[in-house]
Amino acid sequence: MTIINKKTVITSACVASIFLAISINGALSANQERTPPPKAPVQYPQVSVSTVQSTSHRATVSAYGEVTSRNKLSLTSQVSGKVVTLAPNFLSGKVFKQGEVIASLETIEYQQAVANAIASLADAELALAQEELNAKQAEAEWQQSGLADHQASDLVLRKPQLAAAKAKFELAKQSLEKAEYDLSQTKITAPFDALVVSKAIQVGSNVQAGSEIAVIYDISLFEVALPLSTAQWQSLNQGDKSAYAHSAITLSDDANNLQWPATFNRVEQHINANSRQRSLIVNVSNPLALATPLFPGTFVKATVEGTTVDNLWKLPASALIDNHTVWQISDEDLLRPLAIDVVFSQDNAVYVRPKAQISQAKIVNRPLASYLTNMKVVPQLEEVL
């Protein structure tokens, strides 16, 4: 009986231990389910911002164009003949002064024409003198004829004959001038200070009147046509149509780090069929004589200073969402879209005017497509300009 009681006690103790372990484990599990895990701190995106405020800026417009000579000429011969001499420097790339002889043609025929014209003029002058004498004599004879009270015919007074003699004399003079002109044209000269671009004759060539001798450029004045958009025109003059006439203009070749000063010349009063824009024309005087020569055909960037514009913000070009909107950071560090007008741009900066009455703000420098209105952010001040 004692042995049975001991076994019963041991068995009961084991069962009780198992139930106790189960109870403790269940209690611990329940306690763990009721205790929430610790919360991780909220991470807001960091954004680069610039602090901007309204100030005055001088508008600057950039445009591109090709340097050309104002006068580009296909030089032609005015008379026919054989080329007998060429100037030693009649080569592409060489320069001629105005009036300098480029080439000469045979003159024998033109000298003969001048001699014939001189002889014809002498004959016409003699005939005119004879006819003037005849006319005076006819007038005297009419007066002595006793018919002075009657009107004499022009033929009797030799007026038509005198008019014909005068006309022939004038024709002879004009013929001599033409013959002398043709003789002078056997020497082909530079009509202006000229750069030879190409030549089309050699010694021994036979040229006809109108034949091309060379292609030459006037080197006294080069010009650049700068197509400008409507917004760029507005940036230059701001309503003052003559403002750009006094603008500072610089031409540059960024690839070779070269610059040249230029001056305003004129404004084209038509829309170019290719660019669909009007052009501002600027000049460079004596470009080949500059310390750094400017050559025709150079593609340049022109920077034109306009008027001073008030109440503008200067922003990096990367700040634009589009041409009308940027992201602004509110006082609560929330993203807000802000409507702006782009007045002009220069290099990597844009100059804008907010449509709202705001004098200063924090603007996102590099917005992302994932940004949303009222998104909480962490602004990081970064002046990128």
Image: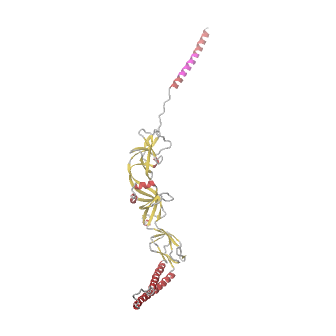
Residue at the location (57% across, 16% down)?
16
Picture coordinates of residue 66 (x, y %)? 48, 61
Residue found at the very far top of the displayed protein: 1
Q: Nearer the viewer, residue 57 or 295?
A: 57
Image: magenta residue range: 15-27
- Tell me the quadrant of the picture where the N terminus can be found: top right
The vertical placement of 302 against 209, above or below, is above
Numbered label tally: 0
Picture coordinates of residue 34 (x, y %)? 51, 25
Q: Is residue 315 magenta?
A: no
The vertical placement of 141 against 48, above or below, is below
Picture coordinates of residue 220 (x, y %)? 43, 67
The vertical placement of 337 against 259, above or below, is above
The vertical placement of 160 against 50, above or below, is below
Q: Main secondary structure of the magenta part?
A: helix
Q: Is residue 26 magenta?
A: yes
Q: Quadrant of residue 358?
A: top left
Residue at the location (45% across, 49% down)?
317
Residue at the location (53% across, 21% down)?
27
Picture coordinates of residue 197 (x, y %)? 50, 68
Q: Nearer the viewer, residue 154 or 384?
A: 154
* Colour setup of the view: secondary structure
Residue at the location (44% across, 55% down)?
232
Q: Nearer the viewer, residue 186 or 258?
A: 186
